[in-house]
Image: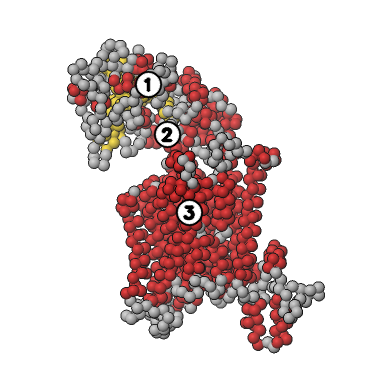
Amino acid sequence: MFRGLLRSPGFILGVGLFALTLVAALLLPLLMPLNVEQRVGLAYTPPSREHWLGTDHLGIDMWSLLVHGLRSSLYVGLLAGTVATLVGTLIGVYGGYKGGLLDDILTVATNLFLVIPTLIVLILLSSSLDEGRSLTLIALLIGLTTWTWSARAVRAQSSSLRHRDHVALARINGYGTFHIVVLHILPYLASYIFMVFILQTASGILTEASISMLGLGPYDSVSLGTILNEAIRNEALGDGAWWAFLPATMLVTVIAFSLYIVNTAMESVFNPRLR
Amino acid sequence: MTTGSQEQPGAVVLAPEARSSRLLDSHPVLAHILGRAGWYLITFMVAVTINFVLPRLGDSSPVDVIMARAGANLDAATAREQEATYLKEFGLVQLDQQGDIRRDAAGKPVPTSLPVQFARYLMLSAQGDLGTSILQYPRRVSEIIAGALPWTLALQLPTIVFGWLVGNTLGALAAYFRGVFDRVIYPAALLTSAIPAFCLGILLVYVFGIQLEWLPAVGGYDEGILPSFSYAFLASASHYYLLPFVSIFVIIVGHQAIGMRSMCIYELGTDYVRYAKLLGMQERKIVRYMFRNAMLPQLTGLALALGGMVGGALVAEMIFSYPGLGMAILTAIQGNDYPVITGCTLLVTVCVLCANFGVDLLIGLLDPRVRSGRAASR
Amino acid sequence: MSTTPILDVADLRVHYRTRAGTKVQAVDGVSFQLAAGEVLGIAGESGCGKTTLVSACMGLYMPPLFYGSGSVRINGESILGLDREQHRKHVLGRKIAIIPQGALNSLNPTRKVRDLAADMIYSHGDRSGKAEIEERLRERFTRIGLDARHVLDAYPVELPAGTKQRVVIGVSTLLNPQVVVADEPTSALDVSTQKSVIRLLFDLMDRQIISSMLFITHELPLLRHVSSSIAVMYAGEFVEHGRTEQVIFDGRHPYTRALMGSMLSADPGQRGKKPVGIDGAPPDLKHEIRGCRFAERCPVARPDCSGAEQPLRTVAGRAVRCSYATAEPGVAAEPQMDAEPQMEAQP
């Protein structure tokens, strides 16, 4: 199965791109000086040899902003993705396995959250938390509002596994729920959960970017979304200061794109008919 | 829905049907509708509560904000009077029998409690009164929404509907004919559906609006023209319409194409398609079978997209400075204008819930598979 | 006698090519004829080529399988090599129809039974009006024992399994095909429903709605009850072909006897006998096999079985593909006295 993945061009491309951005985010700050607080030039100066991406509306080096933004966005995306996957998987697996009343309650709760538009909730939450918006908080918020999709997906899988023989056997032998879920159900869901995680991360990055673009982003950090927000607010778009928004846009696109491609590749490997 | 728990073999579980009323038993459709309606009502109440409570978690009072802006140059007496007017208007203080503000021993106004505010909010909202904007005082929220909503609808509705039609057709073609079709459509759709909407928007604005200057980059219409149904206005508006339209359209097409393609591939592999072919059925009948069966989940998607269209273009509108609901919310957020925020988000939530409810009902009534699933479980 | 057989298959060969380019014969020179009123039961292990054979008898286009040589004629007319549209319109459903395996999932869940049946009729060029079609459907569905008014209006998912099976039979035979292929038509049904479905099939034959049948099943009693003749298939060939009683009770090919012995039977005479599995597995047809294809697993094989070609010979009134099939009743072939019978298949 893994060999199939490694042979899929989409998978390689996606993983490669994403790894590239991760490596850039982790290594670049160590390799070069980055300063996001010091004014190094006039507002919106074009790229030059010293400042590869020029400056923003405050005269701060755009390249530094971009790298910092990349780190923040990746951090939020991964954290939000992890939280959403964890919560969703927990609820989904537990409900799907147990069935009955517990499942019904969890399903109702899930559907409740599913139907209420998450972006709206995030907007409302963020706008009420004027001062306290940190990267971590935002990531947690996103994670805690977008888990519904994974809960539904995982629950469907788990509920069909419930009827498998080895599970019934374990139950008859008196093993507790926790034991059964961890040893008998999760291993079968592992690849599925991984795919879910990838999608949740992609979604987390995009949601953070959207929220930040709307002006509800982290208060004290730079993220790709806040870069875009500043650009739009200060009319970089109209002025043609492409260095202020294009690189950030491309980065968000590349990250989301790479994750989606990986997911699609995994999907078609696990379900060959779709190829 | 899940069947009852069967954890204890041998135990007899009393079927819930045995306890329900005769009326509902003989009218499963009615029971279904009532059931879903009840559930959605609960969801609605939760959503409205969230909608009300969240923005008010912060500390700032809207009156303080207004006063800070407008009352700086007023003398103390006028300032007090203004403040009193605002406080009454926003329903933040308790009133005595003459309609004056009730004050406590220290002379400060007695605030109304949150539950009371909530009740007032519910009552007024039900009548369509969503309050007054802080930022654009004294414009009413409903007025602001009414001015912005048509723009959003005009952009979203055709985009979603056409995007859906085109996307599904392409997906079906790719799945049925495979070959060249598939090799072109599938990767293209993959590409366009993986690009985030606002990224495409920004790219389009930059390339076509700024660099090439083929199309206007920002706004809904030329600055000199006033909104009306005149030809000049409509021509100008459509000019500005194109880029936002394309940015959303392309992504919807990609997304739908991929979904429809998967559904059709699945349907083409089913036993009933195989049997139809063995019977010697005409190809176009088989295509129709495939289409119809793959379509049902796609219709769900359409209804949900339409439901979400009011709130779905937020970021796109922001990029293009398109004067729709998205811009309204954005401006409100930036100015901490929480009545407007609450009003807009309430509207979006109501639309989404209605759409979901409608879809739920329709699918339950139209799809024979779901209908009988319900009948079978009784 | 010189009546044209309804179905005439002559030396039919169907093959596919592996990625390496090897030609694999899925059906390797099968011939038989079916007269009106005859039911040919086809028995054999999974993978022996039964389904491919009947698909080929229908003339189906089924890549990556291709027709090599041979002919299939129904009422004297060849059904192979036709233009696809011609084949669809005039052969499928009209001359030969299939009642598929897994019939219970074969009905489009979002189409009413009436509409599905009407689609079938219209697809074959009939341009009758709705009222006429309705009349026809009602008459036919009532004839096959269904409550026409209720069933025609229903969606498949609303019908019980037995009714669905009847509907499938009804739709498949709507245009009165001469030959019907029944591929495990009763496998998902309980015993009493099975009986009524088989009775229905016979009834249709009696009424001349269908003329002859190819019947595939794994169940011995059913095979015996339904077939007028039986062909035992192994590795793409017929190894025995004769009348029902001959093949079942007095098989002359070692494989036939092994197969009959491995099938469970509730018959009083057979009940006590333990079913005996056949060791080993069918040969991999990718590699060329010299001589008898069953030799590796045959309990009475001799050294030269793997050397010489094994043609079909007539022994005791039926066709057998075994050089050592004897004319003695009750004896398939005699084991060699002075050598160990080969019991194990070669690894």
Instruction: Tell me the distance, in whole angstroms, between the alpha carbons under discs 3 and 2.
Output: 43 Å
Q: Which mark is residue C86?
A: none
Foreground pick, A103 / B125 = A103
Image quadrant assignment for residue A27: bottom left
Instruction: Tell me the distance, in whole angstroms, between the alpha carbons under discs 1 and 2.
Output: 39 Å
Residue tagged 1? C274
Q: Which mark is residue A89?
A: 3
Q: Is residue C346 left or right of residue A12?
A: left
The residue shown at (38%, 61%) is: A258
Residue tagged 2? B278
10 Å crowding of disc 1: few (<14), some (14-19), many (20+): few
10 Å crowding of disc 3: few (<14), some (14-19), many (20+): many
| Image mark count | 3
**Where A36 sits versus B270, above or below?**
below
Q: Residue A92 in the image: x percent, y percent?
A: 50, 51
Q: Quadrant of the N terminus of chain C?
A: top left
Q: Is residue B350 left or right of residue C156?
A: right
Q: Residue C42 in the image: x percent, y percent?
A: 37, 24
Q: Check chain identity for marks 1 and 2: say if they share one.
A: no
Nearer the observer: mark 3 or 2; the answer is 3
